[in-house]
């Protein structure tokens, strides 16, 4: 009969063994995205808008071990721009054999089709197994959704849709990896244009004096905002996020990848045709890694403009839900009259207020500008009975859908910073009279909810698309692999 101690030892050994078997090359804190099963790999392949590289390895293989530090270095360098992933084939034999893996390590590049209606292209990575080569190869295989904007096309770019936009001004003719990454991050929500310094009219229009420069065009009648920070992906992403919410990074644990509606696919096909006709010309290469971008002088960021809500849906999800916190809404009307100056001043005060609260680490409500072009504007102003000509007026309203109250700023003509601040402080303290939110409001808003269309059948294996796509989509010839802006 086995003694208790012996049993314990056997159990401990069994545990140790399974722990060892599960040990891949990369630990939890690794910048490499670790893929544990077929579902996760499919999610990465099918849903990411960014290019990926996937390493299929075995923990015991010598070449895999020696690749590890370079692979992690590449992952850090490409973070946010390219997915750098790994599959431990000791743990997922079937998955690896279904991918046709015959040796370790095998590196595959997955490049999403520019139109989500088509399947991604998957190819073996044939380059050197060094961080530099991997970075070079991957940055050159990032999709380019950046729109080339010239003096002649500026107007049509601005009028293409109602979304916020941004312009990147540069002396280069090629597109930097950071710029491509941003265009992909904001696919469908914010169009990113690139303007060369020689487009004098456009450069003058936005008063750009130095290159590179990033200018946000928030839309809704708001003034362009010039970016002051580092020309790095993360910082630029945060800056642009004030005007539009970027797509979430791919989540390999997501249940099922969201499917496109037919109408969206059509739209994307058209958009793709447009971008594909814009060819790139080569420029000088530099050997810096994408994270070592040239940095513009850093100016301490002051108040950032308050975000604009452009759609009813966004307003609903932010401020009109059951659980929404108090929101401060500035209804800014149409930008026609002298009211424009007033509006700009008030939005400036609100931005300053948010900044002041943030610096003092004081809790503050989310503040949004709601332009008259947002259908939510009329809906709300009507429901709150803020007058017939309110479309032309500036209204400050605090609203708490959860508790069913709202307050109207009644400072009259006093739109000074101090007056607005004391109104906001009073709300924060729970002082002053609240008005009851019309019950009809929230339900009215909900009727308009967009129905999801039934999901479509998944398409065939992505690899079948490879040959066809590489014919149709020539690799951007002679493009700079990664370079400064
Ligand atoms: C995703 O891609 C895989 C192949 O990588 C494919 O078999 C699968 O049907 C696709 N769709 C989903 C929803 O995973
Ligand atoms: C990919 O881009 C589409 C817009 O074309 C967007 O709706 C979707 O959320 C993006 N997916 C991810 C994972 O970012």
Image (cartoon, rainbow, N blue to C red):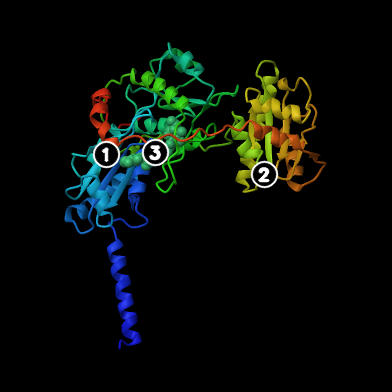
Can residue 237 be seen?
yes
Lower sequence index among marks 3 and 1: 3
Which residue is nearer to you in this view: 20 or 339? 20
Lower sequence index among marks 1 and 2: 1
Above or below: residue 188 compared with residue 22: above
The local secondary structure at tag 1 comes to strand
Q: In which quarter of the image is the C terminus?
A: top left
For image coordinates 36% across by 57% down, the residue present is 28
Instruction: Select label 1 or label 2 by which is in front.
Output: 2
Can residue 82 be seen?
no
For image coordinates 79% across by 32% down, the residue present is 411
Q: Where is residue 272 in the image (x, y as percent from the top left)?
A: 38, 22
Instruction: Select label 3 or label 1 by which is in front.
Output: 3
Lower sequence index among marks 2 and 3: 3
Could you say which quadrant of the image residue 258 lies in? top left
For image coordinates 70% across by 23% down, the residue present is 342
Q: Distance between the residues labelled 3 and 1?
A: 15 Å
Query: Residue 47 — which label?
Result: 3
Query: Residue 322 — which label?
Result: 2
Q: Where is residue 61 in the image (x, y as percent from the top left)?
A: 18, 56
Could you say which quadrant of the image residue 109 lies in? top left
Asked if the residue at tag 1 contacts the one at tag 3, i.e. Cβ–Cβ closer than 8 Å, the answer is: no
Q: Quadrant of the N terminus?
A: bottom left
For image coordinates 39% across by 38% down, the residue present is 47
Could you say which quadrant of the image residue 125 lies in? top left
Crowd around label 3: few <14 · some 14–19 · many ≥20 (10 Å) = many
For disc 1, the marked residue is: 109
Above or below: residue 84 compared with residue 197: below
Above or below: residue 184 compared with residue 323: above
Query: Residue 197 — which label?
Result: none
């Amino acid at each position: 009969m086995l003694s208790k101690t012996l049993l314990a030892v056997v159990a401990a050994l069994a545990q140790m063994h399974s722990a060892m078997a599960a040990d891949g090359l990369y630990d939890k804190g690794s910048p490499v995205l670790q893929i544990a099963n077929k579902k996760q790999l499919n999610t990465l392949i099918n849903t990411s808008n960014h290019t990926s590289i996937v390493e299929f390895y075995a923990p015991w293989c010598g070449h895999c071990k020696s690749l590890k530090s370079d692979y992690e270095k590449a992952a850090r360098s490409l973070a946010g721009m390219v997915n750098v992933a790994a599959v431990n084939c000791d743990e997922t034999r079937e998955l690896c054999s279904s991918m046709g893996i015959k040796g370790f390590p095998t590196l595959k590049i997955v490049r999403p089709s520019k139109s989500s209606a088509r399947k991604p292209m998957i190819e073996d990575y044939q380059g050197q197994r060094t961080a530099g080569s991997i970075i070079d190869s991957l940055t050159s295989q990032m999709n380019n959704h950046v729109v080339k904007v010239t003096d002649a096309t500026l107007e049509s770019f601005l009028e293409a849709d109602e979304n916020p936009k941004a312009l990147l001004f540069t002396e280069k003719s090629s597109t930097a990896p950071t710029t491509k990454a941003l265009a992909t991050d904001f696919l469908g929500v914010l169009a990113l244009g690139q303007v060369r310094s020689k487009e004098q009219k456009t450069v003058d229009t936005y008063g750009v004096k130095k290159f590179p420069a990033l200018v946000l065009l928030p839309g809704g009648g708001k003034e362009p905002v010039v970016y002051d920070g580092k020309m790095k992906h993360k910082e630029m992403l945060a800056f642009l996020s004030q005007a539009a919410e970027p797509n979430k990074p791919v989540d390999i644990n997501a249940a099922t990848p969201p499917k496109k509606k037919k109408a969206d696919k059509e739209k994307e096909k058209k958009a793709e045709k447009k971008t594909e006709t814009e060819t790139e010309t080569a420029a000088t290469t530099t050997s810096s890694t994408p994270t070592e971008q040239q940095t513009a002088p850093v100016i301490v960021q002051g108040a950032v403009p308050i975000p604009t809500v452009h759609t009813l849906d966004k307003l609903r999800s932010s401020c009109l839900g059951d659980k929404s916190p108090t929101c401060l809404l500035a209804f800014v009307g149409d930008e026609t009259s002298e009211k424009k100056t007033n509006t700009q001043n008030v939005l400036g005060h609100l931005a300053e207020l948010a900044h002041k609260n943030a610096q003092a680490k004081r809790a503050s409500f989310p503040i949004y500008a709601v332009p008259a072009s947002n259908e939510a504007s009329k809906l709300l102003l009507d429901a709150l009975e803020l007058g017939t000509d309110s479309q032309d007026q500036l209204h400050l309203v605090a609203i708490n859908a959860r508790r069913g109250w709202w307050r109207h700023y009644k400072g009259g003509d006093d739109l000074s910073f101090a007056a607005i601040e004391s109104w906001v402080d009073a709300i924060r303290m729970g002082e002053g009279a609240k008005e009851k939110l019309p019950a009809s409001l929230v339900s009215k808003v909900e009727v308009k909810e967009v129905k999801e269309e039934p999901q479509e059948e998944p398409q065939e294996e992505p690899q079948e698309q490879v040959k066809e796509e590489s014919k149709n989509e020539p690799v951007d010839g002679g493009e700079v692999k990664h370079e400064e802006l």
